Amino acid sequence: MNYKQTLDYLYASLPMFHRIGAAAYKANLDNTHALCKALNHPENAFKSVHIAGTNGKGSTSHMLASVLQAAGYKTGLYTSPHLKDFRERIRINGKMISQKHVCSFVDEHQPTFEKIQPSFFEWTVALAFDYFRQQKVEVAIIETGLGGRLDSTNVINPLLSIITNIGLDHTHLLGNTLALIAKEKAGIIKKYKTVIIGETHPETEAIFDLKARTMLAPIFYADAELQTSLAKSNSLKTSFRNIDIKTRDKQITFPFNSSNTIKNLQLDLLGNYQLKNVTTVLMSLALLYRHFPFTEAQLRTGLSTVQQSTGLMGRWQILSHKPLVIADTAHNEDGIRMVMQQVKKTPHKNLHIVLGMVNDKAIDKVLNLLPKKASYYFCKANIPRALDADELAKQATQFKLKGVVYSSVKRAFGMAVKQAKTDDLVLICGSNFTVAEVV
């Protein structure tokens, strides 16, 4: 099979959560264990960092990978979902896995794997682990797909586990309270292995502490250990966020720096919400230092070149100016709230929002956060799981959001840009898949 035929086979033959939703979700790790056994356990062949969380895990993963790459380590990166090309999910030092390798892996293992009947995600995890072993990566940054405890990636034994935050998302699968979701995410905490929690929350702290004690795992809360702020030299008009960071506790130090403060770190990810993620990243790097030492110059290089070195897209990504066009994959209550906070701080006259969502989200909670003084362009991404644009518009009217329904994301985007004046802001958000058709 050529590359297109191989992808068609994977999409058509295997359940894919990001396309069809809950029907693809597996409530155990049996298939993943079977796949790893068939491949002679590639998950044990490399050191790894495991990252879960409701929001921010993708940005955190890419930032960590960028710094480790800048420090000279051969770094694997596994993330999901992809925006443009399936191969975005599997990278080494920022370079996507080759089409040839994807095809040969599927051809070689198709007979064996079909007996196991894995989901699309399980197949992809097996491919990533086998590829990282074959290419002899020194460290792999592994992002969970959904949850943690039952996520297919949860067969690794990482040096470090990271849980960025907990919010209400995928509640039909993970639970409808922060506590229940935290229990699922806490499933990535391994015995004796350090865990970092990005954001402290009163409803989840006791759950993480108990799990860590049970697993005899040292636990750190990044926001309690480090204080991160925008530097005075920061400007919304620059192509970087300038960040100052200092330790709150003198027991935590930057190994390469005698001071407890680092000033003017440049981050090329422009979302103000990245302040939370970079706090988690810097805490993680401080604890990874004994395994993978790096210099302050390498840290600065890594953080200032995340997009270039890892290919990250869709996080407050500026597509053009005059009008200012921004794409952001925010798609749940917490994510949309943070994006709307930055919209308020971004100079503009009129706001145009291209909005498309999927059909299994808490849509009312998102719509309730969106500004009424905006022009809406309702659309449906080209996947089965996408919410019908007419239904989205109907629900939006209940929150006094006014706009027009378009037959495709591209038509909605095209009309938004056409109608926007040079000093207006066009925002594309609501779903990874909506953004994917624009960036």
Image (cartoon, helix red, strand yellow):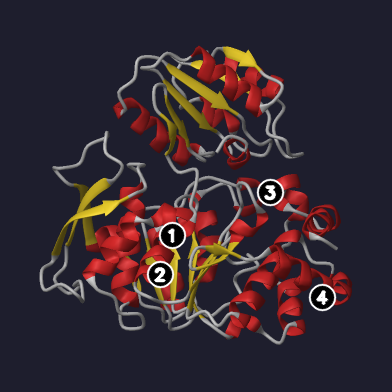
- Give the side of residue 163 with respect to residue 361, left or right: left
Mark 4 nearby-residue class (10 Å; few <14, some 14–19, many ≥20): some
Task: Mark 1 or mark 4: name the one nearer the start of the chain.
Answer: 4
- Mark 4 lies on residue: 109
Q: Which of marks 3 and 4 is in front?
A: 4
Q: Is residue 34 above or below residue 427?
A: below
Q: Nearer the viewer, mark 1 or mark 4?
A: 1
Nearer the observer, 63 or 164: 63
Q: Name the residue under label 1.
A: 309
Contact (CB < 8 A) between labels 3 and 4? no
Residue at 14% from the left image edge and 62% from the top image edge: 261
Q: Is residue 420 visible?
A: yes
Question: In the depicted view, which residue is nearer to us: 427 or 421?
Answer: 421
Is label 3 or label 1 in front? 1
Q: Which disc number belongs to residue 134?
A: none
Q: In this view, does 356 lie to the left or right of 67?
A: right
First of labels 2, 3 by sequence position = 3
Report the amino acid beneath label 4. His
Looking at the rendered structure, the kind of residue marked 3 is His
Helix, strand or loop at mark 4: helix
Q: Which residue is drawn at 38% across and 71% down?
A: 68
Residue underneath mark 2: 69
Q: Mark 3 points at which residue?
A: 18
Instruction: Report the amino acid beneath label 1.
Output: Ser
Instruction: Work out which quarter of the rendered image holds the N terminus and state it.
Output: bottom right
How far is the residue under mark 3 from the one under mark 4? Answer: 23 Å
